[in-house]
Image (spheres, helix red, strand yellow):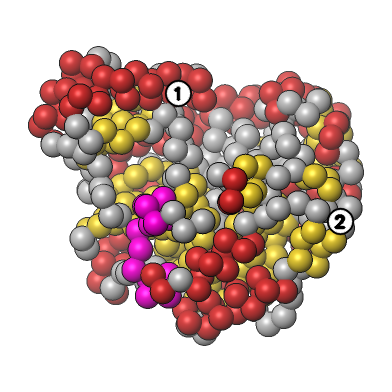
Amino acid sequence: MFKKVLIANRGEIAVRIIRACKEWGISTVAVHSDVDANSMHVRLADESVCIGSHQAQNSYLNISSIMSAANLTNSEAIHPGYGFLSENAHFASVVKEHGIKFIGPDSEIIKKMGDKIEAKKIAKKNGIPVIEGSDGEVSSVNDAKIICNKIGYPVLIKASGGGGGKGMKIVNKENELENLYMTAKLEAKKYFNNDKVYIEKYFKNPRHIEVQILSGKNRTIHLHERDCSVQRKHQKLIEETPSPVLDDNKRSELLSKTVEMVEKIGYEGAGTVEYIYENGEFYFLEMNTRLQVEHPVTEVVTGIDIVKEQMYIAYSGETALNQNDITTRGHAIECRINAEDPSKGFQPSPGKINVCHQPSGFRTRVDGSIFQGANISPHYDSLICKLICHGRNRKEAIQRILRSLDEFVIDGITTTINLHKIILNHKKFIKSDFDVNWLDNDKFY
């Protein structure tokens, strides 16, 4: 196994990776910006290197500074976590050129699957249903009109290199098309430095379901699916596994087709293939060539440490697991706790945590980087921790996570804890009678 790994990230995911490294007996290097000098991931790592100022482009997105830190500390591998440079093909290539192992797939795979147009073509080629729409980039308003008239409104304009709802616009009728097309291209250029957009048929009431995979040179396996349909403006808030809406036949079809595709493209590492699911049918959405925020729900129902397995694949090139090693038990739910004020349009709530009491107890897990006295920076993503609870069934998992939310105390900043209580107590959640648009349409926050 690697002797030393540098974590090119911060916050709760950096802490999660450090913990996995420690269990492997691997020394860890934390990189940090100036404002993160006293953060949890820096305190837990064996070594730390300041790589720049609080602006992400000067630190966590600064490839030169990260590589200098890796060389300075003689790191053998770099784990990118999620976000920042985790799906940056150029970064993965640079890491390889320096003789350091990138804990993730090859840069060419990242490039292919990171381009949503190319990824859609690969899925279609491998027999996975894709959403009706353009075959590739839509380069003019006139082309957009032709495609939209063919598939019918409403449609969704999406950024080819994007994610997180950026560069994504719903068009309900033709007179909205030109303005929203240009807006989507401008957003795509701003956020992803790539103004390519494509068009798909818009689904009004879909679920968002994804499949976790582990893949090496020897085999590809799945760790079942997650349902990530509780979202606000395309941002996930609550995830669970198994999906309450899949029957055994549809689940088996989804899992087997995903494994077949991932194996054929020669993928190595942990990854997630995402789907839209509506009216009993699933359609390819995208592939994330990295660790997902919501990976813990899969870990608690399978008993598999995905981060440790991810590092083993990076080191050996193979997965140590067989598909028959993977069994699931019970139901798990994860709440993303964000430093945001739902009553003020989810305005970020940075500041100092004066009091922090985290829940514990039977089958209760908190993944985070917060502590009493911690400063929540305004410069980064507002996710501060994740609460994961496991039950014998969905009902018990809901009861357990509500009990845990009641125990959770974070004073000094505003968080989404109360919002999660409202959602989890709602009759629509309890009955699993919702879709990805539920929170935006009901406006109960």
Q: Is residue 313 left or right of residue 184?
A: right
Q: Mark 1 points at which residue?
A: 187
Number of callouts in the render? Answer: 2
* Residue 254 screen position, x and y as percent: 30, 60
The residue under the point 48% across, 39% down is 164
| SS at badge 1 | helix
What type is the residue that disc 2 sits on?
Asn
Tag of residue 354 = 2
Work out whether residue 344 can be spotted.
Answer: yes
The residue under the point 64% across, 24% down is 94
In the image, 225 versus 171, the foreground residue is 171
Residue 32 drawn above or below residue 16: above
Q: Is residue 308 left or right of residue 154?
A: right
The residue under the point 46% across, 58% down is 444
Q: How crowded is mark 2: few (under 14 residues within 10 Å), some or many (20 or more)?
A: some
| SS at badge 2 | loop
* Residue 80 screen position, x and y as percent: 65, 40
**Quadrant assignment, res 150:** top left
- Name the residue at the left extreme: 150
Residue 39 drawn above or below residue 398: above
What type is the residue that disc 1 sits on?
Glu
* Residue 320 screen position, x and y as percent: 56, 62
Q: Closer to the camera: disc 1 or disc 2? A: 2
Q: How crowded is mark 1: few (under 14 residues within 10 Å), some or many (20 or more)?
A: some
Residue 82 drawn above or below residue 253: above
Residue stretch in magenta: 429-442
In the image, 82 versus 353, the foreground residue is 353
* Residue 306 screen position, x and y as percent: 59, 59
